[in-house]
Amino acid sequence: MNARAAELGMTNTHFVDCCGLTDAKEHYTSARDVALMSRELLKRFPQVVEYSDIWMEDITHVTVKGSSRFTLTNTNKLLRSYDGCDGLKTGSTSFAKYCLSATARRDGIRLISVVMTAPDSKTRFAE
């Protein structure tokens, strides 16, 4: 992952693990690098917004013990409040606080916005 990040020009990123949930100081990134990573994802896999723009979805979980139905709600509140928003990723850890890589498309132009270290979820979306 670190080699690929370097290939993308992500000069302020170092991964310690693949999940991003590590609170290790050796695990870091910058808003610019998250934007570069998001741009690459959108460029290589544009269909990602077919999933990241879903607000609510009913899921049926099937196991050997039977099935249960539940509803998942997207944590990206901008999908319902920002015209053209169609993704991309929210996240939070105790070390990184509340973060967001959002994308919106208007008038044929796609923009990416990155918010990092917001103190709470509400501030993350306000920023």
Image (cartoon, rainbow, N blue to C red):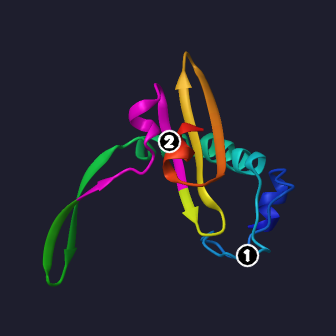
User: What residue sits 48% from the left and 27% below the top?
Assistant: 84
Tell which of 118 and 4 is nearer to you. Answer: 118
Q: Earlier in the sequence, mark 1 or mark 2?
A: 1
| SS type, badge 2 | strand
Q: Which mark is residue 87?
A: 2
**Disc 2 residue type?**
Gly
Q: Is there CB contact under 8 Å for labels 1 and 2? A: no
Tell which of 37 and 79 is nearer to you. Answer: 79
**Disc 1 residue type?**
Val
| Residue 26 position by quadrant | bottom right
Q: Which mark is residue 118?
A: none
Vertical position of residue 91 compared to residue 39: above or below: below
Range of residues picked out in magenta: 71-90
Tell which of 100 and 50 is nearer to you. Answer: 100
Picture quarter with the C terminus:
top right
Q: Which mark is residue 16?
A: 1
Picture quarter with the N terminus:
bottom right
Vertical position of residue 106 compared to residue 65: above or below: above
